[in-house]
Image: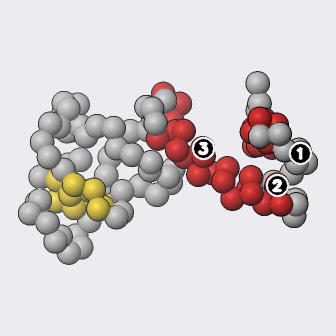
Amino acid sequence: MAETAVAICNLGLMRLGAGRIASLDDTSTLAVACNAAYQDAIDEALGQHPWSFAVERQSLAEDAGANPTSFEYRYQLPRDPVLLRILDIWDEDGELYGEEYLVEGDYLYTDLAPC
């Protein structure tokens, strides 16, 4: 099983019939291409399924900035770790919030408080 970024890239290159790389920092055409595509490929794979190791639950801080929507509250979405998608929204009692919400840019808009 591939355990490093270089090993994963080399598996892909092997399937394409291309050469191997020694490092993602190499200046070879293959290493530059792998380095450019690697993180996007990881994010795409992580976003396709709610992998248990990649799921994190967080309370969001209300943001008092301008709210251009009809929703009552605006929350700043987390930046670290990188948010790939929202699976569910829960209220403070641990109940699934089944109402509508909107994600635009770095913000979540909802009528739920706290979120």
Quadrant assignment for the N terminus = top right
Circles 2 and 3 in contact, beta carbons < 8 Å: no
Mark 1 vs mark 2, CA separation in Å: 8 Å
User: Label 3 is placed on what type of residue?
Assistant: Ile
- Counting residues from the start of the chain, the first of labels 1 and 2 encountered is 1
Which is nearer the eye, 5 or 65?
5
Above or below for 87 versus 84: above
Q: Secondary structure at mark 1?
A: loop
Q: Position of residue 80 (x, y in %)?
A: 50, 54
Horizontal relation, residue 91 to residue 14: left or right:
left
Q: Secondary structure at mark 2?
A: helix
Q: Which mark is residue 30?
A: 2
Q: Nearer the viewer, mark 3 or mark 1?
A: 1
User: Label 2 is placed on what type of residue?
Assistant: Leu
Q: Position of residue 88 (x, y in %)?
A: 28, 37
Residue at 14% from the left image edge and 66% from the top image edge: 69
Q: Secondary structure at mark 3?
A: helix
Above or below for 92 versus 24: above
Residue marked by disc 3: 42
Residue at 22% from the left image edge and 55% from the top image edge: 102
Residue marked by disc 1: 19
Q: Position of residue 16 (x, y in %)?
A: 77, 40
Q: Position of residue 107 (x, y in %)?
A: 30, 61
Colour convention: secondary structure
Residue at 12% from the left image edge and 52% from the top image edge: 111
Horizontal relation, residue 104 to residue 68: left or right:
right
- Counting residues from the start of the chain, the first of labels 2 and 3 encountered is 2
